[in-house]
Image (tube, rainbow, N blue to C red):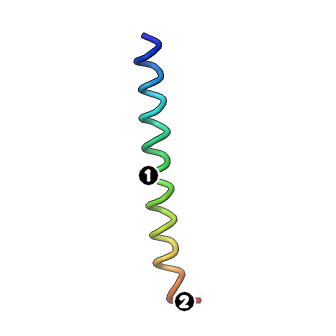
């Protein structure tokens, strides 16, 4: 069960990383033309 738990944690962190990078790229795409 510990391996399953670690996999769940990794998946959650991975999704968070992807979400943050997508948000950052979207923000830069929106902010860059206005700067």
Compared with 18, 29 (above or below) is below
The quarter holding residue 7 reads top left
Q: Position of residue 29 (x, y in %)?
A: 46, 77
Compared with 18, 30 (above or below) is below
Identity of the residue drawn at 45% across and 70% down: 26
Identity of the residue drawn at 51% across and 65% down: 24
Q: CB under 8 Å between callouts 1 and 2?
A: no
Residue extending farthest to the top is: 1
Identity of the residue drawn at 45% across and 42% down: 14
Residue picked out by circle 2: 34
Residue picked out by circle 1: 18
- Which quadrant, please, contains the N terminus? top left
Count residues near mark 2 (Cα–Cα under 10 Å), then give few for <14, some for 14-19, many for 20+.
few
Q: Position of residue 17 (x, y in %)?
A: 49, 49
- Name the element at disc 2: helix
Compared with 15, 9 (above or below) is above
Residue extending farthest to the bottom is: 34
């Amino acid at each position: 069960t510990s391996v399953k738990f670690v996999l769940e944690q990794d998946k959650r962190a991975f999704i968070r990383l992807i979400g943050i990078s997508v948000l950052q790229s979207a923000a830069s795409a929106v902010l860059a033309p206005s700067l």
